[in-house]
Image (spheres, rainbow, N blue to C red):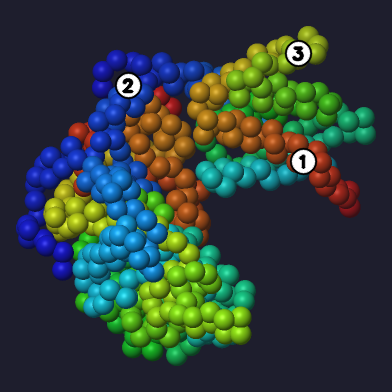
Amino acid sequence: MPPDVALSPAPADDIEHYRADFPILSHIIHGRRLAYLDNAASTQKPRCALDAMTRFQERDYSNIHRGVHELSVRATQAYEQARACVRRFLNAERDDEIVFVRGGTEAINLVAHSWGRVNLKAGDEIVLTVLEHHSNIVPWQMLRADTGVVLRVVPVSERGEVRIEDVRAVLSPRTKLVAIAHVSNVLGTVLPIGEIVRAAHAHGALALIDGCQAVARIPVDVREIDADFYVFSGHKIYGPTGIGVLYGKHDLLAAMPPYQGGGGMIESVTFEETTYAPPPGRFEAGTPAITEAVGLAAALDYVSGIGLSRIGAHEDTLLKHAEDALRRIEGVTIVGQAPQKAGVLSFVMKQAHPHDIGTILDRHGVAIRAGHHCAQPLMESLDLTATARASFGLYNNIEDVEALSEAVREVKRFLG
Amino acid sequence: MTGDLPMDDLRDLYQDLILDHGRNPRNFRVVEGANHEALGHNPLCGDRLMLYLAVDEDGVIRDAGFQGSGCAISVASASMMTGMLIGKTTEQAEALFSILHAACTGQDAAQPTDSAQSEDVDRLKALSGVRNYPMRVKCATLAWHTMQAALKSEKKVTTE
């Protein structure tokens, strides 16, 4: 488990000094102090992660594996140490259960392409929820086109909850996989993944958890969850873009065919026959994002050093303040009222379209996102075309929340 | 909050004419007897508008209307556009789009070709504030792209 220093919820200002670790946050945007509230899309990077990548490129960089020269040895060690770091972060059992990919999207595509094509046939069922990000919908639709699998979709309640009984209602002996988000990127809903995984297993199905919105705010223990696959992106947890993680249970990965062919993923190649390397190398064809893996490891060490429970508690406090502040503004409706929420505050206004809100907030130095957030089926189920979304990170503070609520009041004054 | 700077800046984008048309869109209706229509969709923001045009044999737009949802800029643009199109030839409509496009992207705007257009050109300039907001240019031009699509794809209208 990552070291969690504080067990009790910390006051909102307790970790505020970490804000200084993020160089970009001191920049002035449109003449205003930056309130960066677009963390569900991507997080900013701490100095230590930026420095780790620069230092690595300046001193230790080379291609990895098979090189006999000193720099290749150092680079290989750094890359494999990064893998070990991810293993500790997720509390996986073995380093070779950690596959480096470009991000959560590629991780899901890998499972759909590799595990899905071998193990699923026409009529088999994959269970998703309405609130999935497109990256946890489209790969399964592509698999459906190729294999004839059936997608079953669990509804979301009016408050934005995914209820375990609604999941159970679609599970059947035909279910082969349950693929669900840990936290909704639109509503902030925290899904009961422990219960869902148990229910999936009880039906003989596997469970894939999309952890992109969870890992930066909820401590994740893949063995406790008993997830078969768990995926996340580096850039949503204060690391760089271009690197992400597929965790898969060892026996599953070992039985899966390669995803892409190329260098680095083979044992031996002749023109007659090629034998593939064991996991994780089998799934890492081509030169991987070596520097980014180093940056991701630095970011994971950084958040683990602060403590994910502290970060989560800090964000919960800010989320609650922000919800209270926005609720007081006439015309604002908060979208997503699940009892368990993390990090994300979606809202709409009677007086303004989300895009107008986004533009006006931007001119006040408040960076949020407006749109469908790559979750169009959810939007349709909520009868919305778009929401404005503020999302929190460890470096946000009460000042950011005040800037948000003041700017939303300005929207109302301006367009109301 | 200190100072009025953001609001002054935003006034350039959200001019009174835009705010008025955004709040109270004109020609927000299905056009009876429309023989050209198209769905304009901006997948990035989810803006969606259905445009209806009734064009006669001489290529004159006799009626224009739209329905749908979008931001203040895209709704205002569609509202102003439909008002302008009624009575114009399809060539004049294309010429207006060129003027709008130039205004929105900061290019030198083409000169109005006749006096009847100069009033339209002034109104189109109200949308030119988007040139300082690159992500919003598509909001201003969505209706006009939809008009082009509608003129190209003729809808078979039966009178039965």
Looking at the image, residue B145 lies above or below residue A71: above
Q: Quadrant of the N terminus of chain A?
A: bottom left
For the point 54% across and 21% down, the residue is B129
For the point 59% across and 43% down, the residue is B42
| Mark whose residue sits in front, 1 or 2 | 2
Quadrant in the rendering for residue A329:
top left
| Residue corresponding to mark 3 | B112
| Mark whose residue sits in front, 1 or 3 | 3
Q: Nearer the viewer, residue A299 or B160?
A: A299
Amino acid under disc 2: Gly
Few, some or many residues within 10 Å of mark 1 (<14, 14–19, 20+): many
**Position of A8 compared to A164: left or right?**
left
**Position of B32 compared to B12: left or right?**
right
Few, some or many residues within 10 Å of mark 3 (<14, 14–19, 20+): some
| Residue corresponding to mark 1 | B150
Label 2 is found on which chain of the structure? A
Looking at the image, residue A73 lies above or below residue A280: above
The answer to whether dots 2 and 3 both sit on one chain is no
Q: How far across and down, in percent of the image, does residue A159 sit?
A: 34, 59
Residue A158: tell me if it is visible.
Answer: no
Amino acid under disc 3: Pro
Q: Nearer the viewer, residue A22 or A166?
A: A22
| Residue corresponding to mark 2 | A31
Label 3 is found on which chain of the structure? B
Q: How far across and down, in percent of the image, does residue A334 sit?
A: 33, 47
**Identity of the residue furthest to the front in this view:** A69
